[in-house]
Image: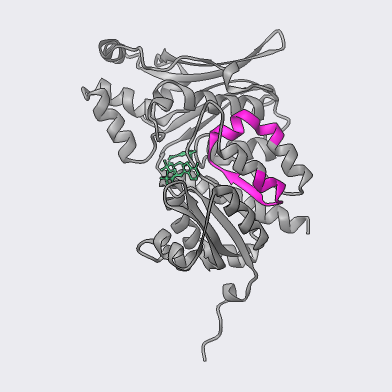
Amino acid sequence: MNEPSLSALLPPYRILLLGYGHVAQAFLPLLASRSEWLSSKLGARLVISGIGTRSTGYYIHPRGIDAATLALETHPFQRFAESSTRMESAEAFIQEGSARNANALIELTTLDPRSGQPALTYIRLALQRSLHVITANKGPVAHAQFELQELAHRHHVQFRFESTVMDGLPVINLSEYTLQAVGIQSFRALLNTTTGIVLRMIEQGYTLEEAISQAQRIGVAEADPWYDLDGWDAAMKTTILANTLMDGQLTPDLVEREGIRNLSLDGICAAALAGTPIRLVSTAHREHGLLIAEVRPQPLDTGDILHMGLGTGGLLSLETEAMGTITLIEHDTLPTQTAYGVLSDLIAVIRQSKHYL
Ligand SMILES: NC(=O)c1ccc[n+]([C@@H]2O[C@H](COP(=O)([O-])OP(=O)(O)OC[C@H]3O[C@@H](n4cnc5c(N)ncnc54)[C@H](OP(=O)(O)O)[C@@H]3O)[C@@H](O)[C@H]2O)c1
């Protein structure tokens, strides 16, 4: 008889996956490919207990299916749904999942920049039910970061959101663990991938529609791409960065926002020809103690540090008291990057939960 594998002997770590779009579909195989590592390093056997989406329904499995097994299926969602119980709503899904001892909710639903809803309600409910929550959704974080962190603290769970800014690049976790006392005075950044792709393609002679289609095809555009082009996505990220890195108390409406909607195609091409291509720039700095954050299109000349971010997924340049300028560049921006940020948050959650046991 074969010996059971190490992971089969471990207790399950149960995950509810809310939203099954580009990021979730990249996350599941990534999780599966790291399952042995997670077993041996963290003593965790990752099990999917529930998957739900708005149009296809919310499903809870009686025992949960090992992430590694589920990821091998040709149609994981259908396979999961076939052997699961359908819940009437996302709220019922979270409640039933929690009643069946789920450990964490991974929230990957669509962005609503104006209110962060309904994801904000889902996250509140999960935290109140003592589930750890990991999200890549900027809306709830930009609108209610401190409320949600406080709620998590009260319920002895964690609320993590690394992927909300620059995908898997460790910006939030870097600030939490390493840059705490560095004294960040200001930042300038290119945070929105879709506008970078669109402006670059227009400079190369493509139409706006062709450029948006390309961003959608690779899975980086928001469900409504105008949330990218009108600067909403960047304003959400700027809010999160200003609050996390610079002790701000901003909400998205306090970020001055101008998108690229009103730029003329001729103006975009002329700026690129002159060697100063236009990109959507996020900034934050203090003036007389007041935190000022902005998102607007700016021409970037060759002496500008943001020029290094042209052709990349994004760039964040921090001005700090203790270390001068620190610049982070994200080279690729596929949904796998975002999925990795979710995985890194999950690892942090499991590690810290074990630490406090
Ligand atoms: N894609 C990226 O590169 C990236 C990078 C960083 C952050 N993010 C963020 O990550 C999140 C997911 O992105 P994505 O690209 O995976 O989005 P997506 O492909 O548009 O998928 C969104 C998923 O959420 C589900 N959903 C939407 N509203 C829902 C609701 N009210 N209740 C339950 N499920 C709901 C959708 O289900 P239906 O299809 O059934 O409506 C779909 O399964 C977004 O908040 C996005 O801003 C994405």
Instruction: Judge left or right: residue 97 versus residue 271.
Output: right
Vertical side of 166 occupied by 321: above or below: above
Vertical side of 114 occupied by 293: above or below: above
Q: Residue at x 48, y 33 (%)?
A: 329
As for residue 173 lying within the magenta part, the answer is no
Front residue of 288/227: it is 227
Residue 147, x across and y down, in percent: 71, 34
Which residues are drawn in magenta? 125-147
Image quarter where the C terminus lies is bottom right
Q: Residue at x 45, y 62 (%)?
A: 81
Residue 33 appears in the figure: yes
Residue 324, x across and y down, in percent: 63, 23
Vertical side of 25 occupied by 66: above or below: below
Front residue of 166/209: it is 209
Helix, strand or loop for the magenta stretch, by majority: helix
Residue 276, x across and y down, in percent: 35, 13
Instruction: Judge left or right: residue 222 versus residue 116.
Output: left
Q: Residue at x 42, y 15 (%)?
A: 297
